[in-house]
Image: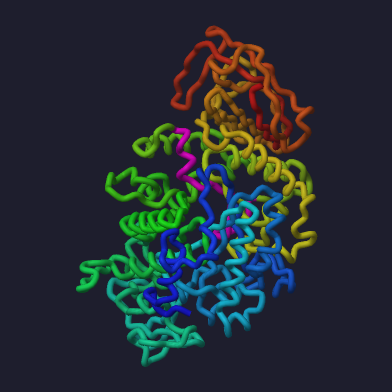
Amino acid sequence: MPSSIWDREIQSALEAARPDGETRAASRRAPFASPADWRDQWIYFALVDRFNNPAAPPQHSWDGAHNAFQGGTLNGLRDQLDYLHDLGVGAIWLSPVLKNCQYQESYHGYGIQDFVAIDPRLASDPEAARQDPALVERELRALVDAAHARGIYVIFDIVLNHAGDVFEYVLPDGRGDGMAPWRDQEYPIRWRDVDGRGRADWSDAPDNPPADAALWPEELRRNDFMRRRGNAFDRPPSEQEIGGDFFSLKEFDTELQEFSEERGLHRPVWTALIRAYQYLIAKYDVDGFRIDTLKYIEPGFAQVFGNAIREYALSLGKKNFFTFGEVYDSEEKIAHFIGRNALDAGDLTGVDAALDFPLFFQLPAVIKGMRPPQAVANVFEQRKQILRGLISSHGEIGRYFVTFLDNHDQGQRFYYSAPANPHAYDGQLTMAVACLFALQGVPCLYYGTEQGLHGSGNSPEAVREALWGAPNAFDRGHPFYQAVRQVAAVRAGQPALRYGRQYFRPISGNGAQFGMSAFTPGVLAFSRILDDAEIVVVANTDPQAGWQGQVLVDLALNPPMATYRVLFSNRRSAADVQVGPVQHKAADMVEIHHADGGVSAGPARALPVTLWPSEVVILRRL
């Protein structure tokens, strides 16, 4: 295994992946080509340890809140690629696969101890992989190749902010602890051995520890490369980004600079991490990176990393390698990281996109009837204003966001079923998926959503079920699986749902007074328009009562009596949905009430729609 980012093994992999590389083997396949536009895909996020192992049952109850390995494997995921392909998945986001501290149950993958090795516990035979690391490497490459053979892209979840719990702090009383209160000055530390014990003689980073001890590759293993100031989350929220560990996960000091004759003034931690992740691209032919805790990295490093990865991928022939980051914050904060920094017109381009937390903060609550639909419209209106300097039209905004309903960091999944009214609550889930896939962005679905996984409590562990242990796991006949499949097919067949401009539509119950739905529960209505095509999405978030009314549509694109066909309904067949035809509204027939309190009048076109409780329809003008 490589011990240094400059080892010949790493250098050979980097060179061999290039089309013009002198050492490229004649039999090596060209890198898998990038998609022309990531908006053409949708992403399925799989926790590798919790997805599948055809060779063994989960090690603990499949739906319990367990902070331990369940036994999912890379081969297990490969075994279900046809299931994912039939669902319509365009890309799989894998939880981190790099080698974590072997003395800890970091099944989630975010406690990395070796940034150029793969965790043997994800192999079909973990003990054999410990003896021969090439075993798990082959299985990972086989998974990527098998996904590519089905036209599915693969995204690795990576970490730049921190390593695993690779050392302990020496507290003032002499005790060692993996987590220490944050303080302004550096703590003394003891690096951990293969059993996770802090060694008194390793107060400075050891020169050549065993492979399962301390931190690898060696270029990252220096005391001054680590922040060593304790847990950042002991500080007030406004100060947590200044620097500190992610609880027990040890933060790198990515601000450190040093001078050498060979490299001049440089940032050594940046160099090591960039080269390590370029190696992963070369060795495993992956198509994108999701970057964990990007919010806690200084924007300068995010920009340099995004640019370095983009340029390396381009040199291989991957013309649209995708990088998106976790910025668990506001629209303004996200704008510091994505694309050409909208708030700092520098020379470098940042990462391509960010997880869409602003939409996540609103959409699930709107679909559940807890907030008015106007809240979703407000998200996109604010986004359009903040990113105005970044986009060429507001149809382009979807390039910069990966949208989602829930994920592994939340305490609850979106779905739950109420025994008294199960069809309405089942409708909420499928309505949410339809809206997610129809709104701007690259949609991402959390694993098990398509099988109705609903969590077992209120903690991140409670929403990390071992899917393969569930009754009838991977059931392609499950109604949620079928609904996701249908919605994905509609999105794939309608370019307007991927690239189109987006307009939130006023609605009316009486046909005369129109406004955005500001009541709870309400009706979420929006259009996606591309050239002369208009797609209309209407969702009734009331789980008890139906809705009959009218939705304004584009005046120029919809002549009176124009008809719409139903592309999707989550509650009934298309033939049973009552829609249209488009009605003309003269200027003296209609009042349009705006969110700012203003009222206007003018000629308009309105589409009559009748919905059941918790029903969403996707419509296209004929």
Magenta stretch bounds: 394-414
Residue 233 visible, this angle: no
Which residue reaches farthest front?
Answer: 26
Horizontally, residue 534 falls left or right of residue 543, namely left
**What is the chief secondary structure element of the magenta stretch?**
loop
Residue 402, magenta (yes or no): yes
The front one of 491 and 374 is 491
Q: Is residue 470 visible?
A: yes
The quarter of the picture where residue 523 lies is: top right
Place of residue 611 in the rendered image (x, y in percent of width and height, measured from the top left): 71, 29
Colour setting: rainbow
The relative height of residue 523 versus residue 187 in the rendered view (above or below) is above
The residue closer to the viewer here, 279 or 527, is: 279
Q: Residue at x 40, y 65 (%)?
A: 161
For the point 60% across and 41% down, the residue is: 437
The image quarter in which residue 589 lies: top right
Q: Which residue extends farthest bottom?
A: 201
Question: Where is residue 220 shown, x and y percent of the image?
Answer: 36, 75
